[in-house]
Image (cartoon, grey):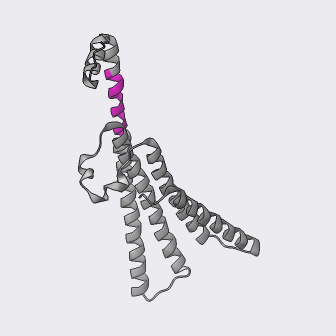
Amino acid sequence: MKEKHTDKEHLEMDLKNQSMIESSFETVLWSTRFFVILAVIFSMIGGILLFIVASVDVVGVAKLVFNVYVNHAHPENFHEVLVSDLIGAVDLYLIAIVLFLFGFGLYELFISQIDIAQKSPASKILEIHSLDELKDKLAKVIIMVLMVGFFKRAMNTTYSDATEMLALAASIFLIALAFYFMHKGGGSHE
């Protein structure tokens, strides 16, 4: 009759059967995953820097608005400049979020679960359980960055004839369609 062993006993028998060289190599190989820490750290630093830059841009817009109204001036294209600058800040915030998602996702996939995040109700958006889940979350935010970038460019473009306006309308329709399918296909689990 064959003996039944637990998983722990199988693991202990396997470890005894391994050669010292194999065991050492696997230990080193497994430890190399900690190099992911570099990507995590620099993603977080990049995200923080982008948040700071975007916030400084918003403060600059606030100063511009204050000066315009205090001096009773109304420069040409004032509204367009304001909206364009604020959209630029939103774009930077979204890219910062991409960097944060990337850093959190790499950490959870390669290093360890973030224990403190498990206690927070806001942790669901940062929970990453697979590489595909990380790619999906990053793709959604990157698509939003592209949409915001398109919106900013469309605002700063001068249209001279009906063909260019039609191209703009078609572009907006295609972006709206892509946005619809992105949300329809992704479900509402976020």
Q: Is residue 156 visible?
A: no
Residue 108 image point, x, y percent: 34, 43
Q: Can you say whether 185 is above or below 1 in the image? A: below
In the rendered image, which quarter contains the N terminus?
top left
Q: Which residues are magenta?
A: 27-38
142 and 125: which one is in front? Answer: 125
Q: Residue at x 25, y 20 (%)?
A: 9
Name the chief secondary structure element in magenta.
Answer: helix
Res. 172 in view: yes
Residue placed furthest toward the front: 1
- Farthest residue toward the bottom? 72
Residue 14's quadrant in the figure? top left
Number of dots carrying numbers: 0
Whether 63 is drawn above or below 184: the answer is below
Residue nearest the observer in this picture, 95 or 126: 126
Q: Is residue 143 magenta?
A: no
Residue 85 located left or right of residue 169:
left
Between 74 and 172, the residue placed more toward the observer is 172
At which x and y percent is residue 66?
Answer: 39, 81
Q: Residue at x 47, y 86 (%)?
A: 73
